[in-house]
Image (tube, grey):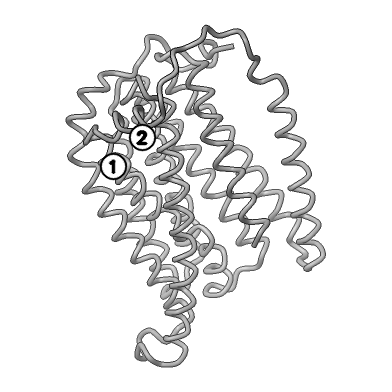
Amino acid sequence: TLAFLMVGAGIHTAQTAGLALATDLAPARVRPRVVALLYVMLLVGTLVSGLLFGAALRDYSHTRLAQVVQGAAMLAMMLNLAALWKQEPRGTAPAEPEVPFRARWQALAADHPVRRLMVAVGVGAAGFAMQDVLLEPFGGEVLGLGVGRTTQLTALMALGSLIAFGIAARRIERGGDPLRLAAGGLVVGLFALAGVMFAAPLRSVAALTASSVFLGFASALFSVGTLTTAMAVAPAHRGLALGVWGAVQATSAGVAVGLGGLLRDVVGWLAAGGWLGPALAGRGAGYVTVFGIEMVLMLVALAAVGPLVGPLGARLGTTASPGRFGLQELPG
């Protein structure tokens, strides 16, 4: 439990600070490219590691699992040390006037569309995250998949996310509204979760596999759309807006993961005891309940995003830059 807590704290602290640094280094016209590149590299790592973990755990044992986790931790530490080395030289940027945090926070909190955006981020992040730790055990317990096979579901979600980032980068490059992308991700997520739910009664591994890809696709569209909006919507408070986006997203996702596991256990116990009737006596009752709650959360997030497309879209203007989407214009 302590290890999971430390990993979560480290990931989200590094993510927020890293996004703020990348935003400071990148000119406004190429920030969507920077966001896309950072997330693409994250997902490439997720995709490759998911495939490698699946292969390594094909012949499963508890000892082998511990060795894989230890090796991944050591590799992550070495990669982070290499990434941080001389990343942010000090003393090269002109000093900026110091503004108290309270004043910055009050100015940002007074912006109603920004508050509504953060509500959408929180509810949407909870909707996508609640199944995060349940999808693999769902495949194992309900559909009888092995550990190696269920681990590959993470790689499939990363593959869907990579496809989504390519589409999002091209749409934003051409002046598309990032909030429309976020809303589209929520709609796709609803259908993907429905596919996961139907995989249980149909006993269909193909349905679970395809739905995993679309879940990754939907989550990426939502994340890129809301993050790009947060980066551009409050230029005077960009760092704070990114910090709030990261805090809201991480907190909501963490609470949702905990509640998802708790609800799965409680509903599963009630179903096993016959309290929910014969129709919900199967092993998938707890999982399906959580997936249904996620769909409700996505509908709420969609309702929160909808009214923002006009007001925030007009404030953002176009994020497109001339020319093709390429790495040659990224900051050095």
Q: Which residue, given by chain and number where applicable, does mark 2 sit on?
A: 225
Q: Residues within 10 Å of mark 1 (few under 14, many from 20)?
A: many
Q: Is residue 280 above or below residue 160?
A: below
Residue 146 at x, y = what percent? 65, 68
Q: Nearer the N terminus, badge 1 or badge 2?
A: 1
Image quadrant occupied by the C terminus: top right
Q: Image check: 165 left or right of 8?
A: left
Residue 174 at x, y = what percent? 33, 20
Quadrant housing residue 17: top right
Q: Residue at x 73, y 54 (%)?
A: 55
Residue 73 at x, y = what percent? 74, 47
- Type of amino acid under label 2: Gly
Q: Which residue, given by chain and number where applicable, does mark 1 sit on?
A: 183
Q: Residues within 10 Å of mark 2 (few under 14, many from 20)?
A: many
Secondary structure under tag 2 reads helix
Instruction: Please tell me which residue lies in front, 103 or 93.
Output: 103
* Label 1 close to label 2 by CB (< 8 Å): yes
Q: Is residue 104 above or below residue 163?
A: above
- Type of amino acid under label 1: Ala
Q: Is residue 314 above or below residue 57?
A: above
Q: Residue at x 54, y 33 (%)?
A: 40
Q: Image check: 250 left or right of 18?
A: left
Q: Residue at x 41, y 38 (%)?
A: 245
Image quadrant occupied by the N terminus: bottom right
